[in-house]
Image (cartoon, helix red, strand yellow):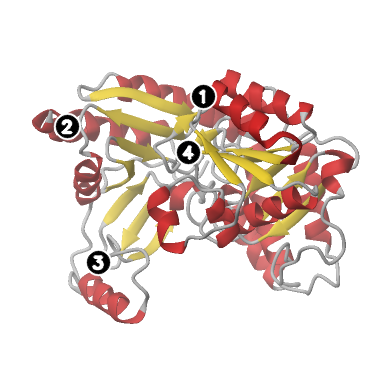
Amino acid sequence: MSGQHAEAPGEHGGAGLERGRVDLQRYEHSLMGTYGQPMRVLARGEGSWVWDADGNRYLDLLGGIAVNALGHAHPAWVAAIAHQAATLSHTSNFFATEPQIRLAERLLELAQAPPGSRVFFANSGTEANEAAFKMARKTGKRTVIALDEGFHGRSMGALSMTGKESIRAPFTPLLERVVFVPRDDTDALHAAVTEAGEDLAAVIVEPIQGESGVRPLAHAFLAAARELTLQHEALLIMDEVQTGVARTGAWFAHQLHGIRPDVMTLAKGLGGGFPIGAVVAFGERAGALLAKGDHGTTFGGNPLAAAAALATLDVIEEEGLLAHAKALGEHLRTALGAIDGVVEVRGEGLMLGIGLSAAVSADVARAAVEAGFIVNPPSPDTIRLVPALTLTRPEADLFVAWMADHGSRIVREAS
């Protein structure tokens, strides 16, 4: 694995300490304010470390929100992109390329998809979920059941399936016949399915809800969703945009449950930092839902993105990162769970939510970045960790030590 060193974060470069401030002013005057004020201006990365424009160093435990599966500048990933860029970077989808075909075959193999399964390539998780929504509509039915607090993207179709009222409200009315039920409420799911009746097109779930605070769905709830969709000849769509590609210690999180969906959406870690999304349709029925002219994308499955994804999958296998993610995740769960002020550590593998005893996650995240650690507060009482799969135990323990001292103190003072 790359990035084996584990020196203390937060070192300063010394020269040009105002550069970051100037760059943030330039950002404010040239980019739309959709993300608020950025925390820092980052300039380069290596392994699980990044440096800002002023030379300060940070341990990146967010990984571009579960995107940088191999960390930053992994040599094999860089070489694959450079080789493909010098060969063929883009064609229209009137033509096929070998990397595109090979990546589709590889995903079908890793997903243990049955004969007749097919892949569609997009550029993001949002686009993958848009395609999945269209697949649901292509069944001839209309009702889609989604989960409260679920997140599937911000375009109009994906947003229609996103159970977060705060980001839905400014854009209503959204697409009709999307029904929301609480996660893990099997009775509510049964009721919604009964109400939809023969109009049920699909149930869409994240095996672990990332944006709501790393909330794993119960096996019983997922099993019920599978049984009910089979009974009603509806699609079970697994949004694995954040959980897929070894993040949980399995190639795909649904494999931890032994439950196979009809449709799986992927993005984030698939390209290791290069934009790509994918829809995997399991079996003949799902694989044939989108026919010629039903859907498309200019950039989806371009050879450069496919080469990046293939390199990512290769490194995960060659460096044993499935087992590493599982083992390091278990270590972090135990170590962080023993810290005063931490009430639980949720998740699987290297997708973890640190549940705090007080609603101070934003304060903890701010203090962490000042100390040289990049983490994320997806909910008021949760810190999310989705680092590179190449993160080492000594690197991880730097954050554990900081959390046991400084992070714990912030939580205790607020309790």
Residue sticking out furthest to the left: 413
- The picture places residue 202, in percent across and down from the top left corner, at 69, 40
Report the residue marked by disc 4. Answer: 148
Q: CA distance from mark 4 to mark 1?
A: 10 Å
Of callouts 4 and 2, the N-terminal one = 4
- Circle 1 sits in a helix, a strand or a loop, which is it? loop
- The picture places residue 261, in percent across and down from the top left corner, at 72, 34
Q: Quadrant of residue 109?
A: top right
Amino acid type, label 2: Val
- Whether residues under marks 4 and 2 lie with C-beta atoms below 8 angstroms apart, the answer is no
Amino acid type, label 3: Asp
Q: CA distance from mark 4 to mark 2?
A: 28 Å
In the image, which disc is placed on residue 411?
2
Q: CA distance from mark 4 to mark 3?
A: 41 Å
Q: Judge from the rendering whether residue 272 lies leftward or rightward of residue 352; answer left or right.
A: right
Report the residue marked by disc 3. Answer: 54
Up the image or down, 298 lies above or below 238; here it is: below
Amino acid type, label 1: Asp
**Residue at 78% across, 59% down:** 99
- Circle 4 sits in a helix, a strand or a loop, which is it? loop
Report the residue marked by disc 1. Answer: 185
Up the image or down, 211 lies above or below 34; here it is: above
Task: Please name which of the two marks, 4 or 3, marks the residue nearer to the observer.
Answer: 4
Q: Judge from the rendering whether residue 373 lies leftward or rightward of residue 223; answer left or right.
A: left
Q: CA distance from mark 3 to mark 2?
A: 30 Å
Q: CA distance from mark 2 to mark 1?
A: 31 Å
Of residues 397 and 115, the one nearer the viewer is 115
Task: Please name which of the two marks, 4 or 2, marks the residue nearer to the observer.
Answer: 4
- The picture places residue 331, in percent across and down from the top left corner, at 41, 23
Of callouts 2 and 1, the N-terminal one = 1
